[in-house]
Every structure is written in C-alpha cells, then in structure tokens.
Image (cartoon, helix red, strand yellow):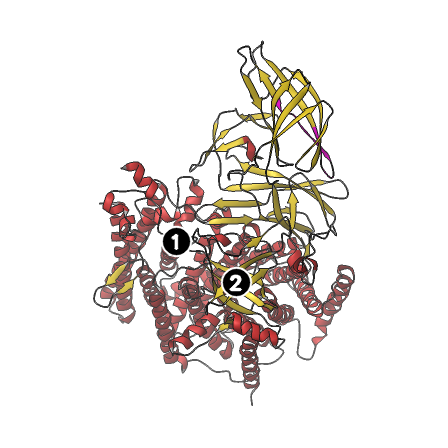
Amino acid sequence: MTLGNLGHLLVILSFVTALVATYAYLRVTLLRTDSLELSSWKRFARGAFYVHVAAILGVCATLYTIIYGHHFEYHYAWSHSSKALPWYYMISCFWEGQEGSFMLWMFWQAILGVVLIRTNKLWEAPMMTVYTLVQAFLTSMILGVIIPGIDFKIGSTPFLTMREAMPDLQVWAMNPNFIPKDGNGLNPLLQNYWMVIHPPTLFLGFALTLVPFAYLMAGLWRKQVIEWLRPALPWMLLTGVILGVGILMGGYWAYETLSFNSYWSWDPVENAVYVPWLVGIAALHTMIIAKKNASALKSSIILVTAQFILILYSTFLTRSGILGNSSVHSFTDLGLSGQLLLYLLAFIAVSIVISARAWKLLPSDAEEVSTYSREFWLFIGATVICLASFQVIIPTSIPVWNKIVESFGGVSKLAPPTDAITYYTKFQLWFFAVIAILTGIGQYFWWKRVQKGKMQDLLTPVWISLFITALLITFGGINKLPYIALLTASVFALVANMTIILGVLKGSYRLSGGAITHIGVALMLIGILWSSGYQKVVSLNGSGLLISKEDFFTKDDNRENKENVLLWLGQSTRMGDYLLTYRGPRTEIRDVPQYVPSSWLDIIEGDFHAVCLRDITVGEKTYHKKGDTVAVYPENVFYEVEYREPTGRITTLFPRVQFNERMGMVTSPDIKRELNKDLYSYAMIGSNPGDAEEWSPTENFRVALQDTFFVNDYVAVLESVTRTNAVEGVALNPNDIAVKAQIKILDKEREYYVAPTFAINQDRMVMRKPEVSEELGLRIQFMEIDPKTGTFSFDANFKQRDYIVMKAVEKPLINVLWIGTLVLVIGFTMSTLRRFREFRLIRDKGVELEKVMD
Amino acid sequence: MKKIHIFGLIVIAIAIGIIVSTYGNASTYSNFTEAEELAKEGEKSEIHVVGKLTKDANGQIVGMKYDPVMDPNHFEFMLADTNKVVKKVVYGSPKPQDFDKSEQVVVIGRMEGDHFACNKILMKCPSKYTNEKPDFKEATAAKL
C-alpha cells in the first residue's frame, strides 16, 4: 500500500468513526435510565471516538511523512515543500495548503475531545454528540470524494499523486513513472519561526470555540439552560487566551516579516478572525453574570453561538476565494466554497432551532437591573464590544454582499474602503476609548466599591488619570482630539484597574486576573496610539536635491509617496538624524553566525549550496576554506545598511529581500529595537547578486604615470606601478614577475583606489587580474606595459552601480504594546486557571452528590 | 418602556448607523471612463479599477516606466480596464514586487488629468499561490 492510499484510507476511517461516534452519543443522550444499555452504548461511543482520534493522528503522520521524506510524487509535497528546507520549515509546509490547515484544526479538535471526555462525564453524551458532528463535517473537508451523478465534490484530499492532480501534463505520455526532482518550495514569507507556531496556536483557538458551543447546545437540548455555563466558562476563557495569542502572533509575524509596515492592517483575513475573538470576549463577560441576569443569559446564548458561527464564516471568507479582489492576501478556491456555505447555513439553522425550542424555558428578570449593579456595567461593556466587532464585519463582508446581489441577478459594485487602516481606526478608536473607560468602571462595580449614590469612590482614579494624561499630552505632543480621548480613556483604565489590585484585592493574585487583563488592554491601546499615530518616516528625501524638473517629480503635495530613498552602494545619504550607507548585499551561510558578503560565494544554481570564493572568516575564526561547499539560504539576500547617528553611534540593519523564481520577490524588514522606539527598515527594491551583470563594451586607455584620464565621467589618475610579491588568489612562482597599478578615481565626494595586477612568468605567459570597484560599477584590467614609450594600457568596463530603494520608519513606544500584550495574556491565563479550579471543585462535589444519591 | 428596551433601541440605532456609514465610506469598482467623469465633476473620492496589463510578444508589459535613479517614488504603466479603455497609471511609490509577473491588477485611486493616480495596487499573480502548471520540460529531457 502506498503512503497516499494509507492516508486516504485513514481519512475515510476518521470520517466514518466521527459519524459512528455521533450516532452512538446521540443514542446515549436519548436513552433514559436503562443503565446496562446506556453504559454499553457509552463505551461504544467512546471507542469510536478514540479510533477516530487515532485515525486523525495517522492522517497527520502520513502527510508529514510524505513531506519530510520528499515524496514529490505527491502533489502536496511537490507544491509546498522542497529539498532545501530545514526540518522546522517542513512543519510549516504541512499547513501551507488548505487541506493541511483543515487537518491542523481537526487534530486539535480530536485532542480536545479526549480532554473533554476525561474531564466532564456528566455532560459527555449530549456535548460530544454536537462535538463529533462538527468533527465529522470538518473531516469531510479533506475526504476528496466526488459524488457521481450530481458531480458534487466533497472535500479535497492532500494525498493526490502528481498524476491524479494534474492529469493533463505532457509528461505522463512520455514517462508515466515521472517523479519531479524537487518541489516548489515553501512560500518565502512563511519561512519564519512565527509561521511555525502561529498557525497551530490559531487553529487551537478555532478548535476551542467549539467547546463552549457544544456545552451550550447540550444544555439547551437537555433543558439545562443555566447549568451549561459552569463547564463552558473556563473553556470560553481559554478560547479567549489562545485565539488572542494566535491573532497577536500573526500580527507580530506581519510586523517582523511582511513589509506591510504595521502589525495590523485591517486586511479581511485579519478582520475575519478578529471579529469572532471580540464576540467571544463579549460572550465571556455576559457569561460571568448570566446566572444572575436573564438578559445576560440570553445574550450569552446568542454570543457563544455567534462566535462559533463567525469562525465558520471566517473560514468561508478566507477559503472560498470570495475576497479575491479585495485583499492583499491571495486566496485560492479549492472548489469547496459550496460545501463551506452549506455547513455554515446548516449550523446556523441547527443552533436557531435548538435555541428557539429552549427559549421559553429561559428565565426573565423580575426587576430592572440597577445602574449601580455590576451586571449593568458588564452588560454595557459586552454590548460596546459587540458593536465594535459589528463595525468591522460589515465592511469586511462587502464582497459577500456583492455576491448575494449578483446571485439574484443584480449588479453591486461596492468595494471595500480604499484606506482600510484609516477607515477602521476612525471608528474602532472611539469604541475602544469607551471600552477602556468601562473596564475601569466595571471593575469598581464588580468589587462593590461603589454603593448606590456614592459614585465619589470613582473620583480618585479620575483625578489621578486626568493629571497623568495632562502631563502625557503636554510632553508627548499629543495634539489630535481622538488621540487625546483614547489616551485619557486608556490612562483611566490603567489607574482604575491598578487601584483595584492594590486596594480591594490587596495584591491577592488569584482574584486579580480580570484587573491585570484590563491593564494589559490599556497598555496595548497606549502602545498602539503612539506607535501608529506618531510613527515618523525617517527615509524622506532630505537632500533638497531636485531630482528632475518634470511635473511629477517637483510637485510634493503627497508626502506619503515620497518616502522611499535610493541608496547607492558605499555612498552616504543623510536622512533625518541619520547618515545612511548601503554596504552591499549579504548572504547567510547556515553554520556561520554572521552574514557574509555575497561576493564571497558562488551559489550553485538550482541548489541550496554555494562554493566559497575565499576563506570565510568572521572575527578571528575561519569557518570555511576557499573552495569549500557550504549550505546557504540562496533565496535570501540581506542588504547591509549602516545607520550613523549624530553621536557617532553606528547601527547596522539587514533588511532582506527573497528572490524566489516561482513565487516572486518578497521583502522583509529589519528592526532595530530600542527601549523607547523601533527603527523599522525595509528594501523596496534590491539587486539580486545572482543575476548576471551587464558590463558595457570595453574601453581602452593608454596612459603614462601621473597622467589624468576620464573613465565614465570619473577623473582618474595613474599614481604608480610597482612590483608586487603577492597577488591575492594566485600562486606566484619565484621567477614570476607581477606588477600592480595604483589608480586613483575621484568621485563627487570621495576618492577610490583600484589596483589591477599584471603578471608574467618565465614561459612569457601573461596573467591579468582585473579589479572591480562595486561602489563605482567599474572593472579595470591591466592589459599591457610598453617599455618603449613608458605607457601602460588598461581596459575598463562599466555597469550600473549597485543600489537599493529603502524605506525607514520610527515607531515610538511600540514596546508598550508588546508589554501590554504580555500582561493581557498573563491576566487572562490567571482568570482561566481560577475558573477551571472553580469548575473542578464544584464538579467533584457534584460527583460526590451523585454517589450519595446512588 | 423599560430600561432594557431603550437600551435596545440605542443599540439598534448605532448598528444602523454603522451600516449606513459603511455605504458612505465604501468605494466602488469602476472603470476609467467613469473615473474621468468623476474627476470632471470635481469628485475627490477614490475608486477601484480592475484591469489587465498589456503585454507584447515577448511577455513584456507595455508602457512600464520605472527609473529609481531618476525618482524611486515614481512608477507608471498602461492599464486596460474591463471595457478595454487604456490609460496611463501613475503610482507614487516604488514598483511593487512581482509586478512583472502579474496579469490582472486592481488599482485604487482617481483620475488626475491624463493619468490615473493610484496609491494602492493589488496584483493577481498566476504563479504565486495557485498551482501553476509545472514546467517539467528540462527534467524530462534529461531523463529520456
């Protein structure tokens, strides 16, 4: 049996066992008290689920074996992997394709299923019925079966061979057993450690949203309309942390790897997962108060359902190709959009039916909730969060709206807002200003610091925060009203939550999770405010030099567009406070700790090895000898750019460009991190040292010593011709004669020396070693010595001098954002642990209670 | 009326406000002819134009001009919109990566005189994410 067959078989097995487990759990749920039959069905259901888990693990192992073993006869391995990839990036190959990312999702759901079975036996049957049904739907996404007759494709399998995936290729006619020698390789953007850990985290978050949903559905189904809250709440919190961390990792990856120039660009893909996360955050706030407040219970039911549905919707948005014209992310449609839509609608229908049945059982509030109660403020907070997410999802869904109109025969030409960052910021900023204020007020009411009619407790933090804000506005130069509002709100949130921790909780760490999380949010908002609102472009053309008199170049109405500078190799350019110098392209050798000049290496074409053209020495240590073959990352070119500050301090940054023949050119920034700001640079245009250089036709010069002559507009002087005993890279015999010419070349700013050599051995064989000045784009060869006239002849060729086009931005206080992120995650984790502990205590009591009743 | 109802009304009002503002802020997919009309009317808002790059027999994009030595922030090319109307497009930033490989592009901006000034280009590169037909000719030739 081939690996592909094994994989496909395991996929089918996992699908069937998921269905069997669903049926068995359904039987257990519907059975009443006949314990004998019940326990045998239960055992059977569990058995089916465990087989399912084993099958899923088998599917993943098979696919990884195919990728890791370079089995390029399989389409998935061919299109996502290559021999040059180190093992850790092969993990990323696994989920680069859509099928793999579905597998990651179901892998987590399988693992979580085992945890759920082992932690909550009371809820197991009804909850797992819902759970395994979803798992069956998900497994069908990689089934790869076409229903004959109606030609409906169910799922797309990652186990297709090249021949099955591309049957039309000419190759098969000539050589049916053809196997490609190497794969397409991984998209260079994904060759980053964040891309190894970000997708698993994100998909764990996706999988986790199913847990509260399954508890909710089980509760409504069995008419335990309030009881589901207790087991679901800790899972909801865990979903919040994991999904949040996953999203933030994605943002950090974008900041570090993409040249988007930001950690968040309101791209539809980002929005599609941000919205369910926000809704989940709203849900967990209402769930906390749902036991006491009927409105909150109803909202919790709607929000928990909405979060799960929105995760499905985001999957639909990102994988159906519907966003094709509106996103910088490119999407492919695997032909699964119909199936995804079907699932989406099916789950909406099922949850509406189940909720509607249980709705009349829901309690209603006897009296109005008081404005002085914690319930009121939490509810307001959750509402504002929901409105914020609504504001994001509506414009993001514009392409969907267009499709709906089209399917009814209409024409809708609505396009998403042209400048997403400005557009979303305009709204979200105000929502988050309100949310920040509510976190402060909410905490005060939560810990009952405010009694009816005694709002003055809140006054202390208000005064303190107004004072701090005033200082920050004055000394931070905050001048725009929305920014002032956001800053004031964030500082208030910070102060109010701090006073709660220090005052009421007296630092009691178990209870302070909520307050700490809110402090994290406040810090993040402050960090975002400064790093985005007050970022400064460093790479403005500060020379004042008019490049051209053409209309386009002289009018400077759009400063935004003049923010990229041209840096010539070796020539310093002033930019802001910095003096920038581009030092040349660099390559990374896998076992050498520093980048080395690309000219030291000759990269072997179509391979990831290179031959050293000289000894590779870093500092004192020689890593490789001349002529050694070394492993490199041939696609990556790093441009060494030196930043000299007025103080004389020099920082070197290495913005990267990846040249990938199949996937194109990709640029990534390099970031200089300081305590109070980041200096963020990326090369918009860079030269590929692997490209053949175009030299001009040869020009010949015949000059005497101290003669002045012109090479390509430069003034040159032949200063001396001296005998030399050593020519680099050439072994001279004792009888050989070598001379070196010293030619001085004057550029606008500085002078350069070029020293070509000329050698002659006893057999009158002539050796001419040309000298290249990369800075000048000049190659000079010592051709002849004429003893009669005392003249020397040189050949010169020219090429375009090496340059890069670069953009550099300063991002102030970005570390406050990262610190806030960390604080948020810590606080969130503390709350999660607290609720899990609470759940366990009550569950164990419940189990004891059951024992007593038996 | 109970407090919760008033509250509900406010929420609904804000939601409607959001939807209306989405329409107000949304751009449109359009073409060069309409873009010219809008520019004549003095309309400042930006639109999306979907178009195809014209390529010559060698697969080179026609009318592409980028000389970073002159100005790294100026890139221009010719684009044919869905009605085959061809206009010069000027992009005030460096030439995007992979531009040469793309066929269909979406430009976002507005007409300014004889050209379409855009500040964003979305590219559809056939080879980047979709699995282009692999070129195996060399490999097979070596084998046979």
Q: Above or below — where is A553 with respect to A343? A: above
Q: Please give the range of residues in magenta.
A: A744-757
Question: What label sits on residue A97 in the rendered view?
Answer: 1
Horizontal side of residue A413 vs A83, given as left or right = right
Question: Residue A286 location in percent, x, y?
Answer: 52, 72
Q: At 41% across and 80% down in the image, what residue appears?
A: A359
In terms of secondary structure, where does tag 2 sit? loop
Q: In this image, A335 relative to B38: left or right?
A: left
Quarter of the image where one finds residue A89 = top left
Quadrant in the picture for the C terminus of chain A: bottom left
Which comes before the other along the chain, label 2 or label 1? Answer: 1
Task: Using the rendered image of the protein, determine whether residue A242 is visible from the camera's viewpoint.
Answer: yes
Quarter holding the N terminus of chain A is top left
**Amino acid under disc 2:** Asp
A205 or A419, nearer to the observer: A419
Looking at the rendered structure, the kind of residue marked 1 is Gly
Q: In this orientation, which residue lies closer to the viewer: A483 or A567?
A: A567
Above or below, A423 relative to A840: below
Label 1: few (<14), some or many (≥20) within 10 Å?
A: some
Q: Chain of mark 2?
A: A
Residue named by callout 2:
A267
> Which mark is drawn over residue A390?
none
Q: Residue A717 appears in which quarter of the rendering?
A: top right
Q: Is residue A297 left or right of residue A118?
A: right
Q: Are marks 2 and 1 on the same chain?
A: yes
Instruction: Estimate the x, y position of residue A600 in percent, counting from the top left.
Output: 55, 31
Depth check: give the residue in front, B40 or A537: B40
